[in-house]
Image: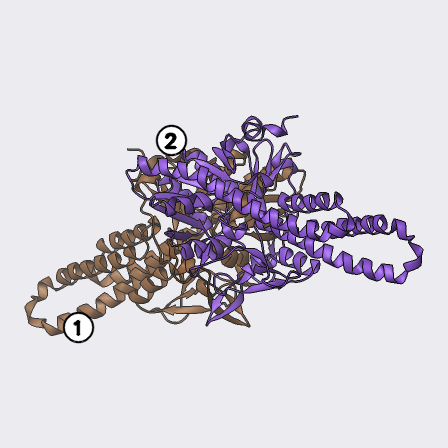
Chain colours: A purple, B brown
Amino acid sequence: MNVDGTHYRTIWLKEGDERTVQIIDQRNLPHEFIIEDLKTTKDVARAIKEMRVRGAGLIGATAAYGMYLAALESREELRWLIKQKDSAVPKEQFDSYCSSEFDIMMKNAGDVLIRTRPTAVNLEWAVNRQIEAMKGTGYDSKISTALKTAIEIADEDAEYCRSIGEHGVNLLEDISNRKGGKPVNILTHCNAGWLAFVDYGSATSPIYAAHNQGIDVHVWVDETRPSNQGARLTAWELGQHGVPHTVIADNAGGHLMQHEEVDIMIVGSDRTTYTGDVCNKIGTYLKAVAAKDNNIPFYVALPSSTIDWKMRDGVKEIPIEERGGEEVKYIQGLHDGNIKQVLLTPETSSVTNYSFDVTPSRLVTGIITERGICEASEDGILSMYPERRK
Amino acid sequence: MNVDGTHYRTIWLKEGDERTVQIIDQRNLPHEFIIEDLKTTKDVARAIKEMRVRGAGLIGATAAYGMYLAALESREELRWLIKQKDSAVPKEQFDSYCSSEFDIMMKNAGDVLIRTRPTAVNLEWAVNRQIEAMKGTGYDSKISTALKTAIEIADEDAEYCRSIGEHGVNLLEDISNRKGGKPVNILTHCNAGWLAFVDYGSATSPIYAAHNQGIDVHVWVDETRPSNQGARLTAWELGQHGVPHTVIADNAGGHLMQHEEVDIMIVGSDRTTYTGDVCNKIGTYLKAVAAKDNNIPFYVALPSSTIDWKMRDGVKEIPIEERGGEEVKYIQGLHDGNIKQVLLTPETSSVTNYSFDVTPSRLVTGIITERGICEASEDGILSMYPERRK
């Protein structure tokens, strides 16, 4: 989407330098727009861990590019190894020796990347897709395969998100018609915007599509403590695209629902069970249960890459990341033109920082996928992905 | 309660100076403990408006002292007026003239105080109680009556809160027994602590009582954005009293409930309808609906001064204060030893800041009053206050 009128994605290969991946360091938004170079797998792991990049789709795409950088590093390492023990490997076994050593190295690199964030399923999915893709190729073409797969994963993510917008916009159009063209008030939590994916976003994609079609929309943006992805990222990207929005404290959504100020909720998902339970940023469940209490439709927009086809019970099974307490104790913002951290609590108070929660499918009105809208249930999801029927 | 081992109330008459009221400026807590002098009605109005003092009970007590300062000011003004038009008032009508002029001045001062915060009912209640008390006395004793009434209101507030603790502690004791002495996990929202009243607090009073009796308690403290009364005030006062607690983002409570980490919720109330609807800090409703979804008891601790005997439907009728947007856009905290404000959102984003929401009685397990625990319903409340039956 656009930043100051120029089109950006959230991750790309640096122009003229196939060994460098570029990202927007999201920690400094909305106050500073900084593009960062990632040159090693370590850079990528740190960028994910420290939330320079975050969001279901973008974590997957970044891991995919990370695997490409890992492939470059593995080739260098193998070159060095082979130089050391040139004679040990017979010439005729050279290719298969390198290939199998390379695959082991890639597996290790993948493990490092997967460990950076435990909740989002896209991370593991992207890493495994890279490993599978490279397994099928000879040693010579592993690098090019890794690059091709990374680009494929990123393009597919953007394309899936675009399709989610195409399907989801109908929901907003219906509400707009029912309200006689008055603004459709959408409440969203966290950032499931283009910054969380490669482009368009999941929850925001129907909103951007509606706005572009001239449907009057207004977005209530949950601040989303502790990391404030709503106040920092969603507000920023909606503002850059010219979408009317209002930032609210996470506490305010229930009151707005009680007073008919919310027509629909749309959020994203970091992991979705095949039964329709949705794991998303901490606080999503509170909004879902309030939406139910007020008969407000609660939709989850998600590309199928977030579906975990092995998990049945979200509340019991999905691993919930616990992040550092400093995210609760301190907050960053702009003071006198500089980004500063301030302490919010008494120095000595304990804090806890669960990063996600699970909304049971019973509270979800529907799921907006790249293939269409379905019920949040095993049957509903399988109706969209019949190839997954056992 | 204690601050650094010394007992404080939240408001008191300055020692040796009957014309000065002292408060703790709560805006600087937990980082700075500052005692402030209030010398005029204007000082009092500003202190309430700017939330130097806040919380249902303390707002009432402060307004009561404000009316006392207004009485002192009115006497000065009348002295001046009388000097100007000495001859105009016949000697025999002097006392009744002054008395009626004084009552008008007090009514005006009361109006100014009531307008500072629209939601809390204690404010109006305390102002009217002062006006009624002074009406019944001759001109000479109005000042002493105002002072006596202010002290009465403050003492009564502290005593009511102490009684709430006596009744509420039984709930915590029962849970503790059921859990075989394992810590009782209480979730609270905002600050309904001693800082919100004159002493003890409402929601915290049963907790302090339990802690003092040796019952193992642990409090989950909701940060309570946007003004962070939980992270700043509740955490601080619990810490000063040695009560184990953990500060969490407002978003985290639902997840904790889903995972049996919350045994009971106790919150306060700024206005309670006679039917049991509870108006409390924004975000309370979200927790109540989640508590219901997880079968967790949701109690509201409140002195009867917060009951509005004229209001039936809380969601429809209670006026909800909308505060300045800067409370959402900016946050204050400690940086390099100084309290600083930092900007959280894009400079150009709109914000909205509703300060309270209403939890319908159907979500409230029970009300803990100074007279005992009752159902959150008209019948339940009247069983505690039979003198209110029409």
Circles 1 and 2, Cβ within 8 Å, touching? The answer is: no
Say how many tags the image has. Answer: 2
Q: Is A93 left or right of A123, judged from the image as shown?
A: right
Q: Which residue does the image show at 11% across and 73% down from the upper left?
A: B84
| Of the pair A117 and B340, the residue shown nearer to us | A117
Residue A269 in the image: x percent, y percent? 55, 42
Is disc 2 surrounded by few (<14), some (14 to 19) or many (20+) residues within 10 Å? some
Using the numbered discs, state the Cα–Cα distance from disc 1 to disc 2 in whole angstroms. Answer: 53 Å
Q: Are marks 1 and 2 on the same chain?
A: yes
Labelled disc at residue A359? none
Q: Label 1, on which residue?
A: B80
**Callout 1, which amino acid?**
Trp
Q: Residue at the spot x=31%, y=50% of the render?
A: B125
The vertical placement of B26 against A107, above or below, is below
Which of marks 2 and 1 precedes in the sequence? 1
Q: Which residue sits at x=26%, y=57%?
A: B110
From the image, tell me which residue sits under label 2: B379
Label 2: chain letter: B
The amino acid beneath tag 2 is Asp
Regarding residue B298, the answer to whether it shows in the image is no
The location of residue A27, given as percent across then percent down, is 55, 60
Indicate the secondary structure of the residue bearing disc 2: helix
The front one of B192 and A250 is A250
SS assignment at label 1:
helix
Instruction: Specify the subunit that label 1 lies on.
Output: B
Can residue B343 be seen here? The reply is yes
At which x and y percent is residue B144?
Answer: 29, 62
State the image quarter where residue B328 is shown.
bottom left
Q: Position of residue B232 (x, y in %)?
A: 51, 59
